[in-house]
Amino acid sequence: MNILGYISAILILIGIAFQSYYMGWFFDKKIHDNLKGYHKAYHEIEKKYINQKFDSIPKKREQRSIASNKESNFQSRVPHKKELTPCCMRLNLWNYRNADINNPENFRILEKLITLLYEDKIIDKKNILGFSKRLVMAIQAKKNSSVRLEQIKFNHSQDQEIFYNMLKGKKGVYPSLLNYVTFKSSENNPICIACADSIILTCLFNENIANTLTFYKNDPLEQIVIDENSFQKIISSYCIGKSHLPDFTLKHKKSHVGETIISAEEESTHIRLHQKMPSINRARKNS
Amino acid sequence: MRLQQTFSKCLFESDDEFQFGFSEKDKRLFYTLDLGINRDPDFSGPVNAAIFIDQKNNLIISYSSTQNTKKEKTEVLLKDISNIDFYFYESESNKWLKNKLSKQNVLPKMLKLVVHKNAQKIDFAYIFPQIEPIMIKS
């Protein structure tokens, strides 16, 4: 009887020891797996960053025909600079904070942008002007300077749903509005013609001017190089006066965005990392 | 898995809205995460989150808007939880600090959660997004 007691006690002790050892091992394995996932995701980010840096090295341009050069109003091109996510290539909606909402001319560009991107996909033609006005009003209602575009609130749920769909975008159907607009607090934020996307240029001027300006761009992130005289020639040929245009600059100003965010997810642990890395231009300057 | 998703969306220390803290008194972890684009603008972008055990013994994650709207929503992560222990990894000393943060408003490297459910302990481990890779001292 006593022997049975001893054996049971020994078995219980072995059981406890085994369980605590097993739990420790199990937990160490969890940490180990997560760390492995983390480092894999981090490695993936580094790989993506290096690839982006490599892609940013200017390529040798192909020679264009003399005839096409003659047709152009451009000066000789300087080697292009690429920059990841330059905020100046987008329309800054912050500029609408002081706009007079009773003057539809003030949000003509925004209206045109919404028309080009979302007409009959998310919003009917007849509602675009009204929606643009309500969007500007919603922007003006936000007093906090750290507010983000996705935090803009509309009075009507229908407008909110339209805006949500615009921000989200739908792959292959319509792009996200965030590819074309930004919302950065700034006192004076002229539109940068050198970096502006061709859709933004179409909204600012018209499709023909946008095509002329972007004629030499091989890449959407490439800058347009044009002098004041050539630019005047182009816009006057379409009877557009400079006074009718919003505040813009022809030359690229150094972007405020000194860093870019690169994301990667490790499949087995679902660890997702977002790393802020120095923007490609800045990294090149520092190196 | 749910917590790993929210922890991977934690804001960086350089972000304006960043906060990360732990209340030792009521064992409540609070931090700010970026929920991105959401149908409800109050729960879009940076949102405050807290993890704790509520009065009904549920392990809860609660979200509150950073837009001064007092709006809140909660999600039950686990039911019938009697206790919870948070272990924060400190890489400088290579130690796990139990229910204690060495510094408030500094993102720790890793978090170990030990949940007590029906006299059973369940472990979870998470890694926070970091600017620099985590160095483990052996």
Image (cartoon, coloured by chain):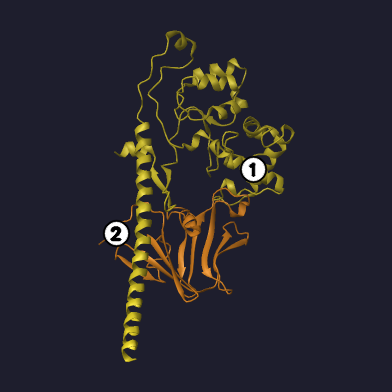
Quadrant of the image containing the C terminus of chain A: top left
Asked which quadrant contains residue A29, the reply is bottom left
Q: In the image, what residue occupies the spot 54% across and 30% down? A: A248
Depth check: give the residue in front, A193 or A277.
A277
**Rendered location of residue A144, percent (x, y):** 58, 52
Direction from residue A173 to residue B34 in the image, left or right? left
Question: Can you tell which mark lies on residue A25?
Answer: none
Report the mark closest to the observer, 1 or 2. Answer: 2
User: Quarter of the image holding residue B113?
Assistant: bottom left
Q: Is residue A241 left or right of residue A84?
A: right
Can residue A97 be seen here? The reply is yes
Which one is in front, A115 or A190?
A115
Q: Colour of chain A?
A: yellow
Q: Residue at 46% across / 17% down in the picture?
A: A74
Disc 2 residue type? Ile
**Residue at the far bottom in the pictured view:** A2
Residue topped by disc 2: B136
**Dot 2: element:** loop
What's the chain of the residue with tag 1? A
Residue A114 drawn at (x, y percent): 64, 34
| Left or right of residue A102, residue A252 in this image | left
Task: Compute the Cα span from label 1 to label 2.
Answer: 45 Å
Q: Position of residue A259 (x, y in %)?
A: 41, 43
Chain holding disc 2? B
Residue placed at 56% from the left, 36% from the top?
A171
Residue at which label 1 appears: A163
> Could you say which is closer to the camera, residue A231 or residue A218?
A218
Query: For chain B, what colour was chosen?
Result: orange
Residue B93 to residue A273: above or below: below
